[in-house]
């Protein structure tokens, strides 16, 4: 049955990620002039890709298995990132440009005299870790509570998730929000007392991202292998039918959507210390849609497909923007069109499961 | 005119007579002017102002042969310091500084008087009171100008010091004025003068007249009278009028907000209506809609580049050009991509988003990554002044009208033409329409092309309001979707009403929330609204949509 | 049951209690009066189209009932109302004596014991036959419960037994999307039975079936009745006759006639509706 196959593929996946982690760590330790040396820049870059992969898994969970095309997952990612950014800002202490021990630089610059209430608690890592999961989770829960109960479906849901991230982007651009406005949060120094710029910490963050990816993967995999996973697919393919079997469709959707948002938040939190900045641009609707394309290219409805898509497209993006900066958007745009037209099941659909998986009739329930 | 002429001639005569015995030490090249300038140059106090009065009384040249200079020009020359005294020749000249020297011209500008060092040329003494007096005279002379605009400027210069014009002069002007706008200004000047009258009844009458005048000067005058006038009745009348004014200002404030809201709404409707067709009628999510709008805006730019000398014609021509061009692009998109994706709205969304990226990058690569300049033709700029506190900018007014015209044309097309009938048939029941002989594939292409073409037209309109650049479309795509979804998919009237409502709501909130927060609030409201009523304000109901 | 009252409800009616006193949802089904389904004074209006008009319809426990009528008579809408998909404008719908269907959503109604087969066979095409049956099986429906759900010998046996009944044993691990039309119909019926409902609503079960399959379906439906109430909507008169059950004819949203198949076939009203307008007969 399917279970065996799924176990095998997760085993393969985990070994692939572990191999990546071990080899990069090893090659990073080699002397800089060695042929196989992996530079620190590359380590951070790969770490960034891994956080993108986590985000892609989150999107795939709701899109590939539940049929909810969220065009707002960048919002959850960014919220997790901001939570982490706030912690990192608090760790700067009086080492900022203005040397104020209580206030981040941008607040001093805006002539604020005290820390806003919603910043309190972020000097504790435990609190931050909780916030990283709970803030995106809470937003997703409240949003989903209303959306799924009133049966907002298909493209309508996509459009309002996009409006959600757009509204958040506008909000975070405002200085009055107390999140650094346009410039966002940056100039981080320490994480848990370790210097963020040191090579070991960068390597550590890379490994942490890889481990997080494995944990998230295993969590999603166990979820999807359970009967709940089958219910999710049932909802994706025939929502009404599932309802008439007695399943509370909105509760399943709400649970998985919230979980997905929390995973996205985690990805954002791992992303921020590795790139050193978080700003409102992360909320931009384009980002959310890009994630969807990673998943579409990799192959939605397979967790490893999402990971392959995220890593592959981002590698291509790095290469393109270096070699032919003009051509990247052309390439990305073409990818969108070609994948939807010619490769509806993505890379993962190219070779594996081909004989077993059903006709490519209608993939989505009609809206 | 006769009275004024008489007074001035008497003044001039007086000056001429009283200084005849003194040898003229200041020359001007025009005998008649010598004593006046001498009096101004040598004299002090009243004699100088009298001299200026006499200068002002000089008639404009009667015939072209008459070389006597224009009084206004002379007074302006004195005020600006362009008229100077050349010491060696004791002559008043027009002097233009050139390095350390001055180039000199005779007063009637007919003779070049050579150049001399700046030490030999002396300024005419001026002080602040003389300057003020000069300005007043110049302004008053403007009252007799042949050009209505100049008369208007002259009147406006007097509005704050109505006492400086004689009642008789004013009456005379009122009697002879032909131009309406100038007449209104004159009347308000006359009212203001009346306000300064010693007779309380006159002041009362003047105050009453100001009731209909909402200009800031009028309102300030009323406030001043309410607090300072000696007569109680006048004060009371002023108070009543102040309260009325406040109410009116408030009212017109709302009217202005409404206008801004409708204006924003018309932009939203223009941007959304093409989407309402492709999304509402065909069920196709076109994420490249914003970029089609952008292409339309670039059409308007390109037409202006092609015909730089007549930008108004270029703008008008770019409407059909943009419609055809973006419509064609739309048809190409439909034929090459979208037709393979019918019935899969989420895939359509992704594919068209890819197209939007390609279109954006094309503009960046082949035109410019920067914004391009699009000029506003003359007829688009200007203001329609309704009263002192309420005015409508013409470009917004035109775009509002344009939006309504496009909307009406579209509704008519869908309702009364054969094409519209087929579009509605296909959108309601595709297979039945095909059975009846409608070529549904062709209708799909044309409908999508129509939506795209209207996006192009919207782009032309937007090019008159905002910067035209590769990112223009992105700014409108979320808003456009919100408008369509809020109005109810498949309902053009819903789109119109929802666009206008959102525009007005946005502008209503702006004063207390700020532009960005207002936008966020509108978005949040919409997100909640869609969850409450997923099918929008004016949903299509019935069994057909349940499936 | 007066058909007099229209859209506006009178403030006080002696035969009714206050709205808020009507129990919201009662878990235990009470069938002591022998009636499984009460539909009274139901009216539904879709944008001016009167789909159901003052309809009264009762189904006894264990009864097998056929529902026929021309297109647009309101058969599917009636099923939509019972299963919670459509809310009527007026009227009341009770499952047994205690369960008010108008206060429940689709999932609650399904859990209370009403199963439905759709007109178009609707199975989960990307799941295997086994998974389809597993999801329909009675048992937990909560999110956490489904996450923790374990298969044991018994449940697997139940599913395999059902596969046997519906002739899909050798298809058990195939993806449902690959089944033939008739097989999908069977699978859906199997799913319906796995739900173990008290009341089954079966919409056009015979469509796309061969004669042998039809006979088998008739046999299956007849065997289900007795234990459960079964309402069958069907166009195929042969099939209806084969069911040997009381027939209700719907026309323009109301009940036109009720009785045995023979009664119905001789009913002049029914003949008029099916065979032509009044003027021609």
Image (cartoon, coloured by chain):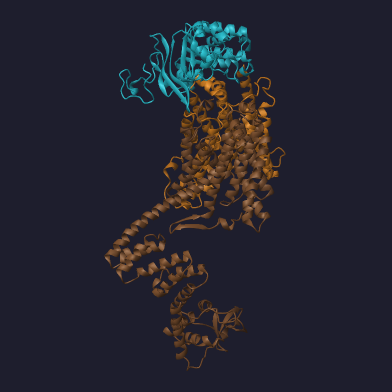
Q: Is residue A247 above or below residue B241?
A: above
Can I make out residue C232 in this image? no
Along the line of sight, the residue nearer the viewer: A151 or B343: B343
Count of labels shown? 0
Residue A157 vs residue B414, the one in the foreground: B414
Image colour assigned to chain B: brown
Q: Quadrant of the C terminus of chain B?
A: top right
Question: Nearest the camera: A161 or C180?
Answer: C180
Residue C191 x %, y %: 54, 14
Q: Is residue B198 visible?
A: yes
Does B437 sit above or below residue B522?
A: above
Q: Is C22 displayed left or right of B362 in the figure?
A: left
**Residue farthest toward the right in the current orientation of the protein:** A35
Q: Residue A322 location, x and y as percent?
A: 68, 44
The chain letter corresponding to orange is A
Q: Residue at x 44, y 87 (%)?
A: B14
View extreme (left): residue: B232
In the rendered image, residue C122, in percent from the top left (x then y), is placed at 57, 19
Residue B126: give x, y in percent of width and height.
48, 80
Q: In this image, B199 relative to B22: left or right?
A: left
Of residue B16 and residue B517, the one placed in the foreground of this image is B16
Instruction: Name the image quarter holding residue C133.
Output: top right
Residue under the point 43% across and 57% down: B389
What residue sits 62% from the left and 8% below the top?
C211
> What is chain C's hue in the picture?
cyan
Residue B291 sits above or below residue B84 on the image: above
């Amino acid at each position: 049955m399917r279970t065996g196959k799924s176990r095998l593929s997760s085993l393969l996946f985990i070994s692939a990620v572990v191999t990546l982690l071990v080899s990069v760590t090893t090659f990073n330790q080699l002397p800089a002039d060695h042929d196989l040396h992996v530079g620190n820049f590359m380590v951070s870059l790969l770490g960034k890709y891994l956080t993108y992969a986590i985000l892609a898994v989150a999107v795939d969970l709701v899109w590939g298995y539940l049929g909810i095309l969220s065009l707002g997952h960048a919002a959850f990612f960014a919220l997790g990132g901001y939570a982490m950014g706030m912690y990192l800002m608090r760790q700067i202490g009086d080492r900022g440009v203005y040397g104020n021990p209580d206030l981040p630089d941008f607040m001093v610059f805006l002539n604020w005299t005290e820390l806003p209430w919603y910043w309190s608690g972020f000097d504790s890592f435990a609190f931050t870790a909780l916030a990283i999961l709970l803030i995106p989770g809470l937003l997703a829960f409240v949003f989903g509570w209303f959306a799924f109960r009133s049966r907002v479906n298909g493209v309508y849901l996509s459009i309002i998730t996009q409006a959600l991230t757009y509204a958040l982007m506008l909000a975070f651009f405002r200085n009055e929000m107390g999140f650094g406005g346009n410039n966002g949060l940056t100039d981080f120094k320490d994480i848990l007392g370790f210097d963020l710029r040191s090579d070991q910490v960068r390597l550590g963050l890379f490994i942490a991202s890889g481990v997080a990816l494995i944990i998230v993967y295993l969590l999603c995999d166990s979820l999807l292998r359970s009967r709940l996973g089958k219910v999710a697919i049932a909802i994706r393919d025939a929502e009404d039918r599932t309802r008439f079997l007695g399943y509370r469709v909105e509760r399943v959707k709400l649970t998985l959507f919230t979980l997905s948002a929390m995973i996205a938040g985690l990805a954002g939190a791992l992303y921020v210390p590795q790139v050193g900045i978080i700003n409102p641009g992360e909320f931009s609707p384009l980002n959310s849609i890009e994630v969807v394309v990673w998943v579409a290219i990799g192959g939605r409805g397979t967790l490893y497909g999402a990971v392959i898509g995220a890593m592959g497209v981002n590698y291509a993006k790095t290469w393109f923007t270096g070699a032919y900066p003009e051509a990247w958007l052309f390439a990305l745009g073409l990818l969108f069109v070609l994948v939807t037209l010619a490769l509806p099941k993505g890379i993962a659909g190219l070779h594996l499961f081909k004989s077993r998986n059903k006709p490519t009739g209608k993939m989505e329930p009609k809206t | 005119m006769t009275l004024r002429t008489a007074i001035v001639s008497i003044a001039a005569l007086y000056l001429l007579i009283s200084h005849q015995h003194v040898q003229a030490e200041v020359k001007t090249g025009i005998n008649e002017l010598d004593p006046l300038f001498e009096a101004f140059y040598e004299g002090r106090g009243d004699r100088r102002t009298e001299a200026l009065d006499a200068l002002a009384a000089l008639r404009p040249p009667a015939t072209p042969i008459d070389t006597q200079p224009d009084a206004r020009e002379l007074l302006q020359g004195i005020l600006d310091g362009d008229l100077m005294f050349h010491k060696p020749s004791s002559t008043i000249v027009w002097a233009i500084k050139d390095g350390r020297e001055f180039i000199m011209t005779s007063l009637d500008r007919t003779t070049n008087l050579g150049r001399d060092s700046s030490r030999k040329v002396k300024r005419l003494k001026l002080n602040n009171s003389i300057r003020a007096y000069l300005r007043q005279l110049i302004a008053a002379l403007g009252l007799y100008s042949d050009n209505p605009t100049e008369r208007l400027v002259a009147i406006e210069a007097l509005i704050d010091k109505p006492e400086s014009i004689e009642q008789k002069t004013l009456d005379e002007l009122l009697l002879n004025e032909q131009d309406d706008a100038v007449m209104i200004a004159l009347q308000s000047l006359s009212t203001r003068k009346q306000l300064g009258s010693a007779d309380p009844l006159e002041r009362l009458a003047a105050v009453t007249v100001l009731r209909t005048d909402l200009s800031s000067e009028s309102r300030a005058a009323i406030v001043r009278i309410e607090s300072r006038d000696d007569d109680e009745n006048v004060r009371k009348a002023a108070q009543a009028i102040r309260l009325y004014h406040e109410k009116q200002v408030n009212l017109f404030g709302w009217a202005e907000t409404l206008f801004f809201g409708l204006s924003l709404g018309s932009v939203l409707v223009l941007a959304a209506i093409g989407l309402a067709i492709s999304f509402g009628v065909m069920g196709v999510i076109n994420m490249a809609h914003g970029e089609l709008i952008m292409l339309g805006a670039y059409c308007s730019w390109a037409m202006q580049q092609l015909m730089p000398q007549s930008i108004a014609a270029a703008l008008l021509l770019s409407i059909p050009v943009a419609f055809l061009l973006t419509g064609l692009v739309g048809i190409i998109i439909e034929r090459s991509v979208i037709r393979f994706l019918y019935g899969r709205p989420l895939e359509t969304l992704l594919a068209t988003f890819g197209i939007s990226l390609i279109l954006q990058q094309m503009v960046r690569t082949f035109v410019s990554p920067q914004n391009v300049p699009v000029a506003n033709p003359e007829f688009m700029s200007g203001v329609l002044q309704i009263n002192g506190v309420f005015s409508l900018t013409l470009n917004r007014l035109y775009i509002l009208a344009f939006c309504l015209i496009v909307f009406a044309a579209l509704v008519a097309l869908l309702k009364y033409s054969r094409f519209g009938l087929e579009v509605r048939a296909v959108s309601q029941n595709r297979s039945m329409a095909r059975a009846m002989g409608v070529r549904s594939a062709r209708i799909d292409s044309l409908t999508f092309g129509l939506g795209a073409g209207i996006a192009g037209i919207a782009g032309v309109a937007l090019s008159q309001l905002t910067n035209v650049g590769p990112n223009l479309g992105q700014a409108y795509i979320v808003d456009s979707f919100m408008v369509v979804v809020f109005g109810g998919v498949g309902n053009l009237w819903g789109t119109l009403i929802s666009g206008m409502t959102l525009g007005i709501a946005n502008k209503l909130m702006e004063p207390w929330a700020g532009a960005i927060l207002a936008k966020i609030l509108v978005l949040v409201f919409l997100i909640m609204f869609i969850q409450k009523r997923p099918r929008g304000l004016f949903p299509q109901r019935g069994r057909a949509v349940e499936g | 049951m007066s058909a007099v009252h229209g859209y506006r409800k009178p403030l006080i009616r002696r035969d009714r209690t206050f709205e808020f006193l009507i129990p919201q949802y009662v878990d235990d089904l009470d069938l002591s009066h022998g009636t499984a389904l009460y539909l009274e004074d139901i009216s539904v209006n879709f944008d001016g189209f009167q789909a159901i008009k003052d309809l009264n319809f009762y189904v006894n426990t264990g009864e097998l009932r056929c529902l026929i009528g021309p297109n647009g008579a309101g058969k599917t809408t009636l099923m939509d109302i019972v299963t919670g998909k459509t809310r009527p404008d007026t009227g009341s719908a009770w499952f047994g004596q205690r369960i008010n269907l108008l206060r429940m959503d689709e999932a609650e109604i399904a859990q209370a014991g009403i199963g439905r087969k759709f007109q178009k066979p609707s199975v989960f095409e990307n799941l295997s036959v086994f998974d389809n049956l597993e999801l329909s099986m009675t048992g937990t429906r909560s999110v956490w419960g489904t996450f923790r759900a374990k298969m044991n010998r018994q449940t697997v046996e139940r599913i395999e037994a059902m596969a046997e009944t519906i002739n899909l044993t050798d298809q058990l691990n195939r993806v449902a999307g690959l089944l033939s039309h008739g097989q999908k119909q069977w699978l859906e019926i199997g799913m319906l039975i796995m739900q173990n409902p008290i009341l089954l609503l079966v919409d056009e079960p015979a469509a796309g079936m061969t004669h042998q399959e039809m006979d088998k379906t008739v046999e299956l439906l007849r065997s289900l009745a007795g234990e459960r109430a079964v309402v069958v909507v069907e166009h195929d008169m042969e099939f209806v006759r084969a069911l040997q059950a009381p027939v209700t004819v719907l026309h323009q949203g109301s009940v036109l006639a009720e009785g045995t198949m023979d009664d119905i076939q001789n009913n002049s009203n029914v003949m008029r509706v099916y065979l032509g307008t009044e003027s021609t007969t």
